[in-house]
Image (tube, rainbow, N blue to C red):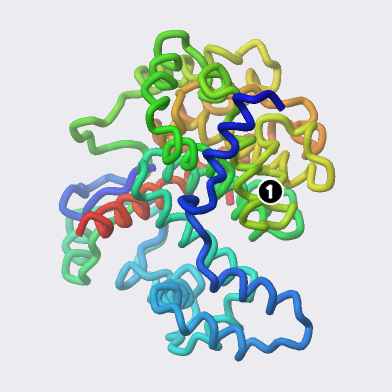
């Protein structure tokens, strides 16, 4: 790694100003890895965080789950499952970091998460929740670059516009690194599991993932689909190439792609409404 | 398929999704998808407090809505860097036919 890049890595990874994950998530992680822990213990931790509790109850009572009136956190956790609660905790804290930055990027991330979930379900893959969360987080590096390299952002934007570059090309030209690599650094410093950090680091180059190539391929494809759909704003407006490795890994073909696109576009109508709702709630 | 507020609904539009009481999927279904709206049905829905519904095609045009030609032009622009990639070329075709179908009468929905 050359000097410029390692300097930048230092700046970006300056832990004092790096957004941190709430302690709730680390505690939940360690409890959920422990066989002896009970849902009641986890519920107690979640209950300490009022915002998270409210979100979990809202989700458990949301019509899409179709449960009847859930009023306690432990019931909600049993109904939703610990993994959903963990994903919710992670994504709601990411949302707080993201919403201050740009609605366009948030929509792109939310859309990619939706697409990743649809692809994973269609292909009957295990760990759909994790894949969805990886989709939500795949561009977290852009948020960090936006926060830490605010001075260089106009230059990056100028290059994208004038030279018709992809955002990663412009980032490489200006910063000597790109959002995927920065996302990888960040996921290391947050101690995210490999099944999240690999898709984040490798979503533009599936070949670099080692243990979670299928998940990475899903996130890669989800990112491409969302850009093809023109949903949200990820920084540039060009559809990236679908990598052959990802295509083969997921055993895609035209009819499968068609089914995925139809389902995705159908769902994006709701995502758009949801994102408008959140944006107006954030303003209010 | 398009989501419209009930006050813009008109006779002869066709529902693209079921309507439920209180707009909640756990509520009582009021009206199934595929139903053609009529003036009397619309006023019944108004009485039942339905706020919005999904209809086939794109019958209501508002400011800022983009027509099919514009949408397809945007699509081509987004794919301009990668249409030589054969997987992307496949995806472009899938999207092209999806957009064309979505703006047409069948709402782009396939059999479920």
- Quarter assignment of residue B50: bottom left
Image point (48%, 48%), residue name: A110
Give the percent coordinates (x, y) of residue A49.
44, 78
Quarter of the image for residue A209 reads top right
Q: Position of residue A175 (x, y in %)?
A: 54, 24
Percent position (x, y) of residue A57?
44, 78
Given residues A95 and A4, the one toward you in this image is A4
In this rendering, the answer to whether A243 lies above or below A115 is above
Q: What quarter of the picture does the N terminus of chain A occupy?
A: top right
Could you tell whether A252 is left or right of B95 in the image?
right
Determine whether A219 is above or below A35 in the image: above
B112 horizontally vs A102: left or right: right
Please state if A169 lies on the left or on the right of A17 as rendered: right
Is A147 rendered above or below residue B36? above
* Callout 1 secondary element: helix
Determine which quarter of the picture holds residue B107.
Answer: top left
Q: Nearer the viewer, residue A58 or B99?
A: A58
Q: Residue at x 42, y 44 (%)?
A: A107
Task: Look at 46% across and 8% down and name the residue there.
Answer: A163
The residue carrying mark 1 is A197
Residue B14 appears anywhere in the view? no
Which one is in front, B27 or A140? A140
Determine the chain carrying the residue at label 1. A
């Amino acid at each position: 790694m050359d000097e410029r890049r390692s300097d930048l890595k230092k700046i970006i990874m300056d832990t004092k100003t790096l957004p941190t994950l709430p302690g709730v998530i680390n505690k939940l992680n360690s409890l959920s890895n422990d066989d002896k822990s009970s849902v009641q213990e986890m519920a107690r931790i979640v209950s300490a965080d009022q915002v998270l509790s409210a979100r979990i109850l809202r989700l458990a009572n949301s019509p899409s789950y179709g449960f009847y009136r859930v009023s306690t956190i432990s019931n909600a956790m049993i109904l939703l499952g610990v993994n959903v609660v963990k994903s919710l905790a992670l994504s709601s804290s990411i949302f707080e970091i993201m919403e201050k930055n740009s609605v366009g990027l948030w929509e792109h991330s939310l859309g990619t998460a939706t697409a990743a979930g649809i692809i994973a379900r269609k292909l009957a893959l295990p760990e759909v929740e994790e894949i969805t969360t990886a989709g939500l987080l795949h561009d977290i590096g852009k948020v960090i670059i936006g926060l830490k390299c605010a001075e260089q952002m106009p230059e990056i934007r100028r290059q994208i516009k004038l030279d018709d570059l992809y955002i990663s090309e412009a980032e490489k030209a200006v910063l000597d690194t790109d959002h995927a690599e920065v996302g990888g650094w960040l996921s290391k410093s947050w101690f995210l599991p490999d099944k999240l950090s690999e898709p984040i680091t490798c979503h533009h180059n599936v070949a670099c993932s080692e243990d979670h190539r299928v998940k990475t391929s899903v996130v890669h494809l989800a990112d491409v689909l969302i850009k093809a759909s023109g949903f949200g704003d990820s920084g540039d407006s060009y559809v990236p190439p679908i990598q052959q490795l990802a295509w083969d890994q997921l055993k895609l073909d035209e009819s499968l792609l068609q089914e995925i696109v139809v389902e995705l576009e159908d769902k994006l109508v709701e995502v758009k409404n949801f994102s408008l709702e959140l944006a107006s709630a954030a303003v209010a | 398929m398009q989501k419209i507020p009930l006050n813009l609904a008109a006779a002869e539009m066709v529902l693209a999704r079921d309507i439920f009481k209180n707009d909640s999927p756990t509520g009582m279904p009021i009206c199934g998808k595929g139903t053609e709206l009529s003036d009397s049905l619309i006023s019944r829905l108004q009485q039942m407090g339905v706020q919005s519904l999904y209809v086939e095609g794109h019958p209501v045009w508002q400011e800022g809505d983009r027509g099919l030609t514009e949408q397809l032009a945007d699509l081509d622009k987004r794919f301009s860097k990668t249409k030589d990639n054969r997987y992307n070329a496949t995806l472009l075709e899938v999207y092209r036919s999806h957009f064309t179908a979505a703006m047409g009468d069948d709402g782009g929905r396939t059999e479920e």
